[in-house]
Amino acid sequence: MDQMPVVQLRHATKRIGSKNIVNDLSFDIPAGEVFGFLGPNGAGKTTTIRMMVGLIKISQGDILIKGQSITKNFNKAIQNVGAIVENPDLYKYLTGYQNLKHYARMVSGVTKARISEIVEIVGLKDRIHDKVKTYSLGMRQRLGIAQALLHSPSLLILDEPTNGLDPAGIHELRNYLKRLAHEEGVAVFVSSHLLSEMELMCDRVGVLQAGKLVSIQNIKDFVHKGGASRVCVTVEPAQTEQAKRLIASLNKITLPEENPGQLLIQMNKDEIPAVNRLLMDAGIQVYSIQMQEQTLEDKFLEITEDKK
Amino acid sequence: MMIKLLKNELYKLFRTKKLYVFAAIILAVLMLNLYNYQPGSESTIWTFTHGQSAPLVLINILSQFMVIFIPIFIGDSIANEYRQGTLKLSLLRSITRSQLMKAKIASLFVFISIMVLFFIIASYVIGTYFLGWGNGTEYAGQLYTPIEGVLLTLGANALLILPYMAYGMFVISIAVLSSNMSLAVISSLVIMTIGLNLNVFESIALYSLAYHIVYFHESFVHTLDWQLALQSTGIIAIYLTVFSVLSFCKFKKKEILY
């Protein structure tokens, strides 16, 4: 089995003037993984993608696609890549099918049957012979994904792929990308600001902040690791202050909460019984205890705020 | 791969309305010029009386319009595609930037050839419709047999393809540098208009591309002067080479940001 990562970033740096837009990025993406690339606006996500596909030069370092350098061996490297960078910009005066034929001519081995198969997969069968200018944003996104998949790439790079898709479309795309990665071994690199979507879609995420990679880890570890969860305890409103004092005696932090009788406490799951017992023994009437899992969004904000 | 890339470029050329609009403009201008045309009258500088002379005598009309059509065609093919992001998708394929540039240059050649051919056919048809075919082709005070006239017409128009291509390469270099269709079209037109106005200065006219776009064929068909013909060809070849090298180098290094 081929163990070589599909993508290898080696100290990839993009410098404009004296400023490093992307600074010393190094990470690998193996086959069969959906990799999420997170970062606030202006962090350098799209610049990184542009370097990965050779649209802009790498100032320092290198990026290898299936072992081929995108700078030194562009043709061999890029033939393994299918991508949408920023927007699915297609010829609006051509039909969806004519667009796909246009891009199919630029690679060898894409048959009419393959085009039909892809059209079916992205759900554009009924509108593929309509002009692209009549398409909704979601349909253009699907067509963009179709052109990226035409030549069965080993690496699929998608910049904000769920933009414009309706919930059903997002669900379909997510399942398709996961299937593509996990069953067909394609490495999928997704950049998105929809953190909830990334949480459902990705196996691993990397967080970019001001051009630097500040975190890269498995999605489950990323969300849950090290973090105490928030627990929402609802008590009799008249007993709120008494409950707060008791919880403070356990050295637990109580977060501000607007609703009367509700306490938000930062603690681990295994500490809940002790807190419950303490409150019960003191005669506090506890109506509910609910764990609020830390989301990718919470974690993302935590990391990006920390690194500012 | 080059054939496939050229096929893509030509497919786009025939799918957009530009080509047909340009053809309609040429047709309308020819109609306007030959409708009510009275040879030698005060309202015209032309004296030809046979319809078959039209494509050769009116050849400058095409030159004047090609100065406008070529920047629009290139602006759309390069600068507009860059801005709209469609160029980016093509560059994500396993093709080199040089290959894509060559395909675009080849499509420019096809575009120019189609326009030239259309002008010849349209001029023959409209000229014959208004003046009749006639017994020969009149050009520069001489009467050529119809066969000679057709060959002369084809030759003169074909010769002008060379300065048109040099002008096209000049516009391509501006389009690559500016990445903006309006800027590419306007700056090309401004520079060419200045060049056309400078043609009155004989000492520099021979070295001006604007001069050759209008008069290049004359040293071959008007008064055959081989020395002048070779000199003119050499000057156009220099323009062609310089702007080709500039376009290829700049396009190869260009950062694609749209």
Image (tube, helix red, strand yellow):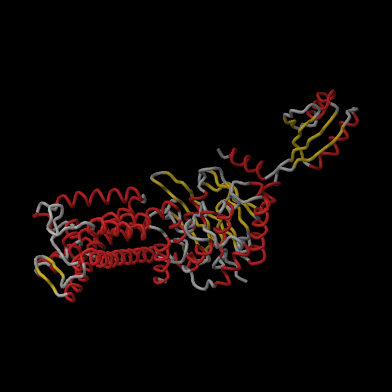
Query: Nearest the camera: B253 or A17?
Result: B253
Query: Nearest the camera: A293 or A245?
Result: A293
Query: Nearest the camera: B244 or A248?
Result: B244
Residue B57 x %, y %: 17, 63
Residue A242 left/right relative to B252: right
Whether A34 is drawn above or below A298: the answer is below
User: In the picture, which quadrant includes the C terminus of chain A?
Assistant: top right
Residue A134 left/right relative to A258: left
User: In the picture, which quadrant includes the N terminus of chain A?
Assistant: bottom right
> Does residue A106 appear in this view?
yes
> Does residue B252 appear in this view?
no
Residue A267 x %, y %: 76, 38
Whether B136 is drawn above or below B86: the answer is below
Query: Nearest the camera: B219 or A82?
Result: B219
Picture quadrant of residue A183: bottom right
User: How many callouts does the rendering have?
Assistant: 0
Residue A236 x %, y %: 86, 27
Residue located 77% across and 31% down the image: A251
Residue located 54% across and 73% down the image: A111
Residue A223 x %, y %: 68, 47
Whether A67 is drawn above or below A18: the answer is below
Residue B154 left/right relative to A160: left
Picture quadrant of residue B24: bottom left
